[in-house]
Amino acid sequence: MFPVRPVAVFFVCVSSLLWAASPRPKDRSQELKGLTLEQLGNIEVTTQSKEPTQVWDTPAAVYVLTSEDIRRSGATSIPDALRLVPGVNVARVNGSRNWAVGIRGFGDQFSKYILVLIDGRSVYTPLFGGVLWTAENVMLEDIDRIEVIRGPGGTIWGADAVNGVINIITKNSQDTKGTLLSTGGGSVDQNTEDARYGAAHKDWTWRTNAFGFVRSPEFHIDGQPAYDWSRFGQVGFRADRAVGTNEFTVQGDAYWGKFGDAQSLSTYTPPATFISYKSTNVSGGNLRALWRRKFNDRSDVYLQSFWSHEHRIGSNFGEDRDTFDVDFLHRLAPTKFQQFTYGLGIRLSPSTVTQTIPTDTFIPLHKTDSIYSAFLHEELRLVPEKLSLILGSKFEHNNYTGFEYQPNGRLLFTPTQKFTAWAAISRAVRTPDRVDEDIQVDIFAVASPLIFARVIGNHNLHAERMVAYEGGMRTLLHPRVYISGAGFYNVYRNLIAQGSPTIAPAPDPQFPSAALLFTFQYTNGIHGNSNGFEVATDLQATSFWHIRTGYSFLDLDLKDEPGFKDKVTLEKLRGSSPAQQAFLQSRINLPHHFEFDQSFRYVDSLSAQKVRAYTTADARIGWNPSKTLSLSLTGQNLFQPHHLEFGIDPPPNVLIKRGIYGRLIWSH
Amino acid sequence: MKWSFPSEGLRLERLNGFRSHRALAITLLFFEFAIPAAIAQPGKPSEDDVKAAYLLNFGKFIRQSNGQFSHTPFDICIIGRDSMGQTLDDLAANQFIDNRPVHVRRLADVTQAKGCTIVYFSSSENDRLREDMALLPAPDALTVGDASDFLDRGGMIQLLLVDKHVRFTVNLSAVNRAHLVLSSELLRVALAVTGKPSGEQP
């Protein structure tokens, strides 16, 4: 199943680049010597590819999505923008329910194996061990960049960063002074309004913003209710102060959302299943404060604290959760050859589940999750400027599995200014979440004989473990051609699965008499490995034409651990990640301030989700007539009227529609 | 909860995938021809080449406002990841400004910039400009950079690309604070000059 065609095409591209890239003429300086300032200003120059300087010396597979990448892609939400990152699998489930996001596989509606942060604040919930993308929205014009790390980030960020870390970084309020108003609407994104105002006062700069959107349902087959609309609103603020070597930031948000939903639920008497179309409400807020003091380029201190509150209530259950977190980090350089970092952190998260139907509950209803962590990180410059060795580990104590450690070792080799190579071995863990441990869901299965199925949590779970062997390179092959690549081999153990049922008479008085109960308990039961690679390029083809491409390949080989029998989870894990993915984004600057942008995406099939391989494209025309006004028209998912990206329960699957929307931005 | 078995329709999926493969392959091949054609443009100097030439040139137009002449080497210091490379070294080779030999120093850290006459902040420093300026141990050096907010962060000369030409803007307040004077010849050619004008005009 090796992807012959795409790989062959890629190699043809690379070899022709290598052939065509001419070395710089040696007498360039002769041309320029002796020219006056005025003459220098009159020379026409070739433009070059911007090497991403933040990532150059990072011994990990990092990819940075700039705000320009996001703006020109026509994306309307963060998961949408992540489609154009190599190695990230993004599938839209339906209009409201969620997005299935994964890095190097394991994408599902819960995004369990990636840690997602907004300005360093984790938005990963211990309820189901993942991210509720529908509730985590950031005004796109506020995003400075999104840093995506493929591979384990356990040493720095702790547990649950098994397959990757996505860090969404908003702009400093210094960069958002003035007024911004943005309005848009279209066939699927019916209405989006953003407003922002920022100003400076003495040492402080600040901004406040408000945004909201209304989305219409995606494509539903005939006869099925179109239940997946969504409405969302959020207000927020941010203030920053920088005095000499001290930096302070305070920010906060509050949000409200309402989504149409469909949940498959069961009742005890009469024994039945039904679909509830009751909408889900979410609301919440967060507050974050950060102090940073820099001693010199290699030494600083960082202290961050945040609180967040999440409220969600749907037809299956509700949850109220508070999170309190304090993190401290100190970087120092005791000798010229060393950079030592250590950190400490505490996170406490009390939550209460509200039962809305007798057949769905958590035992206990109330729980406080706690994580106490410390980490050490040492960078040794073995050969200054050329070879560095990094060793480190994170040590955590959590209330589910006790003590966990996540060590890693990395090598960074920078032989020239234009080439970097790195290699890494890391261990990462994912701690069980409340669903794995505490859930109890009863489902009516068969009428005669009367059978119920029960999915139940397990209080004796071990953490899921992964050891990753990775390597990668980056090169500025030519001033206008940047190529990066990474490969990995991951070994997984203790993955949590449903297992085979134990059969017993259903207990009174909950269940009707003479009912049988098939109990499936979550157990650590799956192991295996995955391997693959990603390649990405950034090309400044001409001064007005910029191209970004990415290709990823994944081979997942999972099986039941000896003595464990599970079919359901195993098939789902094996068949929910695409073996190959590719994208291409082309951005053309036209005369009279017009922009023409296209992005093409190919995603391989997902057998367990009944999703066929598909290719589709988005196209955008932008016009920026003045510094204050910006207009754009974007078409999304253009190749088909609708296509399936991911399965959903209850069926039928919802298809993602072709859509168009326009946007107007006024800023001053 | 649904129990389902892998679909029998995998063969159908493979066929659909083939069609999509073809569309993608054609698109990639098209760009593959565009790229070599674009790269093989006849040798125009790059942005970095012209920036290097500017750095050498600026040296001829700065003076200390207290009228003192320095006898130390004229050091052009590059902070961070240098992309000007060989061109800068070639331009600086065997050059003298005000009878001072020109040296190029490449520094990883701004705290090593003692004694520099011109300090150039490469784009790898863009996120740290405020801190770099605070830690700079050469208070009378001319600071040059190409970050879009370089002048706001206290820089003196910002290099920028305007319609395929490399131009520069000047912040005179920062120049005054360092007790430097820039010749009117330089100010005349600048794209824009902001800040309070200096007392003297040579």
Image: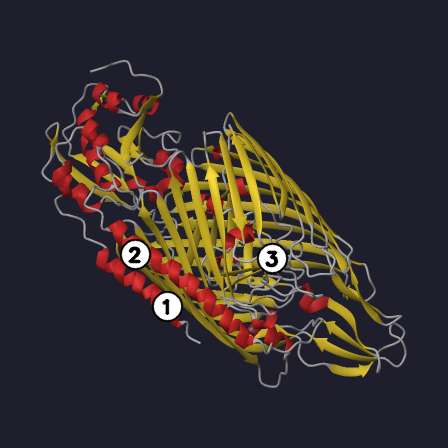
Q: Which mark is residue B33?
A: 2
Q: Look at the numbered disc 1 and give the secondary structure of its residue.
A: helix
Q: Is the residue marked by circle 1 packed among few (<14), some (14-19), or many (20+) residues within 10 Å?
A: some
Q: Which amino acid, mark 2?
A: Phe
- For the residues bearing labels 2 and 1, Cβ distance under 8 angstroms: no
Name the residue that disc number 3 marks.
A656
Image point 29% across, 49% down: which residue?
A: A480
Left or right: residue A373 compared with residue A442: left
Q: Which amino acid, mark 1?
A: Val
Mark 2 chain: B
Mark 3 chain: A
Mark 1 chain: A
Give the spatial CA distance, label 2 vs label 1.
17 Å
Is B173 rendered above or below residue A71? above
Q: Look at the numbered disc 2 and give the secondary structure of its residue.
A: helix
Q: Position of residue B113 (x, y in %)?
A: 27, 38
- For the residues bearing labels 3 and 1, Cβ distance under 8 angstroms: no
Image point 71% across, 65% down: which residue?
A: A650
Q: Quadrant of residue B59?
A: top left
Is A185 rendered above or below residue B60? below
Q: Position of residue A544 (x, y in %)?
A: 34, 42
- For the residues bearing labels 2 and 3, Cβ distance under 8 angstroms: no
Q: Position of residue B4 (x, y in %)?
A: 66, 76
Image point 19% across, 36% down: which residue?
A: B53
Which tag, 3 or 1, sits closer to the chain's start? 1
Is A499 rendered above or below residue A621? below
Give the spatial CA distance, label 2 vs label 3.
33 Å
Q: Which amino acid, mark 3?
A: Ile
Q: Which mark is residue A7?
A: 1
Give the spatial CA distance, label 3 vs label 1.
29 Å
Q: Is residue A580 visible?
A: no
In front: mark 2 or mark 1?
A: 2
